Image: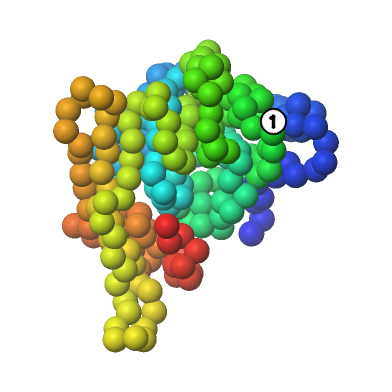
Amino acid sequence: MTDAALTLSSPAPAGEEIRVLQSRIREMQATKLDTRAVPTHPSLASLLPGGSLRAGAAYSVQSSTALVMALMAGPSAEGLWCGVVGLPDFGVEAASRFGVDLARLALVPHPGEEWLTVTAAMADVVAVVVTRAPGRVSPSSMARLQARIRQRDATLIVLGDWPQSEATLRITESSWSGIGVGHGHLAGRQAMVSVTARAGSGRPRRARLWLPDGDELFRPVHEPPQLTDVRPRALHEVAG
């Protein structure tokens, strides 16, 4: 794979690492949002409030890295930078197959005790910030991070609970195909994706999606697959 994500894992303090990241991204490309609407994957757009992600807003994804990658795919395809903080097991190869451009992806797998500082600083240089909070976050810390996200017109995607989220995405049903009675190969995963907008915004919206299908495409179950010359790879890497 020729493209590689920017990964910061040196022993330098988090603040210094972020300054290095800012410098490297600015050298490669300066990307700022010029609209409040942030495009996401078409299969998820109809489920989200307003039909897209929103700059300055936060979103919660429950227990599914695959859904996180699907949300990142749209902004990344539009040329926007994405940053991932505090997810050491984030699979870049799986993200690439979901459509995330690794040339515009920055990773800080181990922010340590400076998680809040690193996540807030990441919003200064990328359009979409993905993170997982290290345990309980105080209301004051949450408010500071939310204020930075709004100020910088970034979009925050949290893997786990986030009370200030615009919407919460979760998989309520999931099944794999391709396995017979104790043998066979995984050929695709169907999942019921449910999106609940913030309290008082109506009932959850649901759709059954391939996450992914046998050709490693992310699409609605009843939508025919697109022609592709990409060779199928192992699917176990994107389960979850």
Query: In which quadrant of the rendered view does residue 44 lie?
Result: top left
Left or right of residue 117: residue 159? left
Q: Residue visible at 66% across and 55% down?
A: 2
Q: Is residue 11 left or right of residue 140?
A: right
Figure check: 5 above or below 129: below
Per the image, the residue denoted by label 1 is 114
**Residue 181: horizontal and vertical position, in percent?**
29, 86
Residue at image location 32% in from the left, 79% down from the top: 179
| Number of numbered discs | 1
Q: Quadrant of the C terminus?
A: bottom left
Q: Residues within 10 Å of mark 1 (few under 14, many from 20)?
A: few
Q: Along the horizontal axis of the image, is 11 left or right of 108?
A: right
Which is nearer the eye, 104 or 239?
239
- Depth check: 215 or 230 in front? 215
Q: Is residue 219 visible?
A: yes
Name the residue rendered at 39%, 27% in the picture.
Answer: 163
Under mark 1, the amino acid is Glu
Residue 69: % across, % down: 46, 47
